Image (tube, helix red, strand yellow):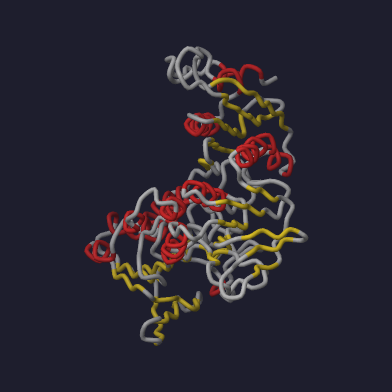
């Protein structure tokens, strides 16, 4: 059997490696547009902020390691079209500028996503960058560590934009953030949590502009300022982090069903609407434990897990294929002195889905008052109004907020109720919690 995999970053490489382990005889051919494989883009904000200085630490595997597994890997090769009827792909060698046709028995699309480029005038000015690829990271890091670059403007206040803001603050830069919507992280957290994160930004001297559209960058050769309405802010470096779009345009004539944004719709086994074509990663939707509709949640964790499952399914008969149990969209963020995590449904998602839910928001302490470093910690629970089954949770604080979010992820996966959370046997010692942990208290006051 010949399996062709398009994309060798997260999902694609997870699938290829697993497929080789379960099927020693399969012919596995991987095409990757970049010059590298198994790249962990999540490390980019920390690389540009000089938390570490070796870019190779973001590369989990080398091309030689992949080829040593008996996988035929072609770098700098782009699949430009797919003929689903004939089971063929057209591949362009970007170095030689030649094309060839390759047939497949099963095909996996793991082409990831690219940065969305908003319609901002003068983006071609020097010192204006995205942060998506290894090359982006090298360029932004060089500027971030340049002492003459004093003012950094970030367009977009999602996870990447905010992580870049922290990196810039670490380097002593003056930071300005521009967000088109009325608050940061609108799709991930509810307002009670983002209010605390926005307060942290402002308290630490970050200039935060919400409900603000950047229309133009100003400068003669390199960027000098950002123009947004009647606001003009000086900038020596601009990082555009306004989201991503799936790399799926080459599939437009295949019959593969997609969301309006181009994300490939898959089922729990990773199958698309076209027979023998599978997909996973940032180019595809992901089955959700709590949502009936396909969800587009581009996360490295889910990409790797689905990739591993697809690695088995690409080798298994159709009737024996394994299914992914579903994501909860669990995600977290370190923002200056705060950390925040979310899992399951936020209140806005639950309301949009037509669910009858209740919520509770409470602030307690992370541990006992007589142990040094006690800080506030805020918990929000979203739960079914009738059954009290927990549907979502968000936690923010200076320490241990993310690990408490992980507890909530397990609780949601187990379909626990708020009453069960209230009595959950969590660890206690003065350095880690109070006798009744903040999660216990949140569960107990949920009515």
| Rendered-image quadrant of the C terminus | top right
Residue shown at 54% from the left, 41% from the top: 335
Q: Residue furthest left?
A: 68
Residue 224 in view of the camera? yes
Q: Nearer the viewer, residue 149 or 310?
A: 149
Q: Is residue 332 visible?
A: no
Up/down of 348 relative to 11, above or below: above
Asked whether 266 or 244 is in front, the reply is 244
State the residue at coordinates (40%, 86%).
97
* 21 lies above or below 354: below
Residue 348 is left or right of residue 159, and the answer is right
Residue 190 higher or lower than 14, as above or below: above
Please state the horizontal and vertical placement of residue 34, each as a whole percent of the image.
Answer: 40, 70
In-front residue for pair 174/15: 174
Vertical comparison of 198 with 18: above or below: above
Nearer to me, 261 or 156: 156
* Image location (x, y in percent) of residue 284: 54, 59
Q: Picture quarter containing residue 156?
A: bottom right
Residue 386, how many percent across, how many down? 71, 25
Image location of residue 192, percent across then percent down? 68, 34
Position of the N terminus, as image quadrant, is bottom left
**Residue most extreme to the right:** 230
């Amino acid at each position: 059997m010949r399996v062709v995999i398009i994309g060798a970053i997260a999902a694609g490489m997870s699938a290829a490696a697993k497929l080789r382990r379960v099927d020693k005889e399969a012919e596995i051919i991987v095409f990757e547009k970049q010059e590298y494989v198994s790249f962990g883009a999540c490390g980019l904000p920390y690389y540009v902020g000089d938390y570490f200085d070796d870019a190779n630490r973001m590369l989990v595997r080398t091309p030689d390691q992949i080829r040593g597994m008996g996988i035929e890997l072609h770098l700098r090769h782009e699949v430009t079209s797919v003929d689903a009827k004939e089971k063929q792909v057209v591949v362009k060698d970007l170095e030689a500028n030649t094309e060839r046709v390759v047939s497949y028995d099963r095909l996996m699309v793991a082409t990831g996503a690219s940065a969305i480029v908003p319609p901002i005038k003068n983006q071609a000015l020097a010192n204006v960058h995205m942060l998506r690829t290894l090359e982006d990271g090298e360029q932004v890091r060089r500027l971030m560590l340049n002492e003459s670059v004093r003012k950094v403007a970030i367009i977009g206040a999602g996870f990447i934009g905010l992580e870049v803001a922290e990196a810039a603050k670490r380097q002593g830069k003056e930071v300005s953030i521009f967000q088109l919507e009325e608050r940061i992280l609108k799709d991930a957290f509810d307002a009670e949590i983002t209010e605390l994160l926005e307060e942290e930004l402002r308290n630490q001297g970050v200039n935060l502009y919400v409900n603000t559209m950047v229309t133009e960058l100003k400068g003669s050769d390199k960027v000098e300022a950002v123009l947004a309405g009647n606001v003009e802010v000086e900038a020596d470096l601009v990082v555009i982090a306004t989201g991503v779009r799936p790399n799926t345009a080459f599939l437009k004539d295949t019959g593969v069903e997609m969301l309006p944004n181009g994300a490939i719709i898959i089922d729990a086994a990773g199958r698309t609407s076209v027979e023998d074509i599978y997909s996973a990663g940032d180019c595809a939707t992901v089955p959700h434990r709590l949502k009936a509709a396909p969800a587009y949640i581009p996360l490295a964790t889910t990409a790797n897990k689905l990739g591993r499952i697809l690695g088995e399914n690409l080798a298994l008969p159709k009737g024996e294929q394994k299914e992914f149990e579903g994501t909860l969209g669990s995600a977290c963020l370190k923002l200056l002195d705060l950390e925040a995590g979310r899992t399951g449904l936020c209140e806005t998602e639950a309301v949009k889905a037509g669910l009858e839910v209740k919520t509770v928001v409470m602030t307690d302490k992370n541990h006992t008052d007589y142990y040094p470093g006690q800080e506030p910690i805020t918990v929000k629970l979203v739960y079914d109004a009738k059954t009290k089954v927990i549907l979502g949770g968000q936690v923010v604080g200076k320490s241990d907020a993310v690990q408490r979010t992980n507890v909530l992820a397990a609780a949601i996966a187990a379909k626990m109720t708020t009453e069960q959370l209230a009595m959950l046997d969590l660890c206690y010692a003065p350095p880690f919690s109070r006798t009744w942990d903040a999660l216990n208290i949140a569960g107990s006051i949920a009515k």
